[in-house]
Image: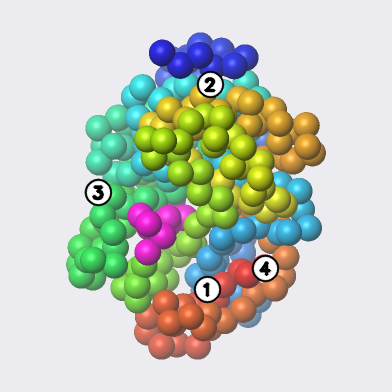
Amino acid sequence: MLTLMRAPAPAKADEYTSLPFIHDVLPENIADFNLGADGGLIIKELRRGNPYSKEVALTFDDGPHPAYTAQILSILRYYRVPATFFLVGVQAERYPKWVQMIHQEGHEIGCHTYDHFRLVNLPLDEQVYQIEEFTSLIERLTGTRPNLLRPPGGQYDHFTISLMNKNRMALGLWTINTNDTAPQTSAGELYQRVLDEVGPGSIILMHDGADASLAALPRLIETLKRRGYSFVTMSQMMAHANSEVMNGSNGQGASANGDSGQWKIISY
């Protein structure tokens, strides 16, 4: 049994209310979320936020999880910290109330595919299912369509790029991988790893269902706050990014249809 530091007991779904200070920066409320300066559609990739802004983004993959999600939400609510949850479709379908609770709390929901399959191993029609079936499910449950994709393993191909263009999605990756699902990773090791690597604009990858992350989370939030960091969602971080936008040139960064300007990367 994990003992959480200074966090209240998990509340029931109907006891949660919206946190409006988060909602104003969700993708649907950011006018130029996926638009270039010329008004054309672009795909944005975010691995790290603005290096001149002392903010970090907490992200949780693979949920919702019935034994962990409520505890994570209780901790975030206690500290009034927003986060981005990259959910998996089969889990969301199995535990819809937790999806609604995450949304009601004002946190951001991103796509981590429907079945947690590596997209690079899939043909186009299966990638369509993995992304679009997920987004349709979340829209039915919350009324909001996810605008961020985090492909399992961070791997994607030209089919994925085409689907992101079609669905107006941005690619939300990470700066710090806490390795919290590894059996040998303790809460103390995770805490120290983040503190050793964190900097302005860091995106911290954790998992909904990992004991190490759950145990370390209160202490980690307190320490980062003491060090002057503020906490933001991935969409907030993207909205606060500086204006440097570069054309992709790494092979995977080519446009799916070859059109100029369809693939651009926020890079620091």
- Indicate the quadrant containing the N terminus: top left, top right, bottom left or bottom right: top left
Gap in angstroms between the C-alphas marked 2 and 4: 33 Å
Q: Is there any visible trace of residue 38 in the rendered image?
A: yes
The magenta region covers: 145-155
Whether 127 is drawn above or below 86: the answer is below
- Indicate the quadrant containing the C terminus: top left, top right, bottom left or bottom right: bottom right
Relative image position of residue 97 (x, y in whole percent): 35, 27
Looking at marks 3 and 1 on the same chain, the residue that comes earlier in the sequence is marked by 1
Disc number lying in front (4 or 3): 4
- Residue kind at label 4, given as amino acid type: Tyr
Looking at marks 2 and 4 on the same chain, the residue that comes earlier in the sequence is marked by 2
Q: Residues within 10 Å of mark 2 (few under 14, many from 20)?
A: some
- Give the residue displayed 41% in from the left and 60% down from the top: 154
Which sits in the foreground, 116 or 103?
116
- Give the residue displayed 35% in from the left and 30% down from the top: 65
SS type, badge 3:
loop
Q: Residues within 10 Å of mark 4 (few under 14, many from 20)?
A: some
- Give the residue displayed 72% in from the left and 52% down from the top: 200
Residues at discs 2 and 4 in contact (Cβ within 8 Å): no
Q: Is there any visible trace of residue 80 in the rendered image?
A: no
Residues at discs 3 and 1 in contact (Cβ within 8 Å): no
Label annotation for residue 268: 4
- Check disc 1 and report the residue beneath it: 42
Disc number lying in front (2 or 4): 4
Gap in angstroms between the C-alphas marked 2 and 1: 36 Å
Label annotation for residue 74: 2
Relative image position of residue 175 (x, y in whole percent): 57, 55
- Check disc 3 and report the residue beneath it: 115
Gap in angstroms between the C-alphas marked 1 and 4: 18 Å
Gap in angstroms between the C-alphas marked 2 and 3: 27 Å
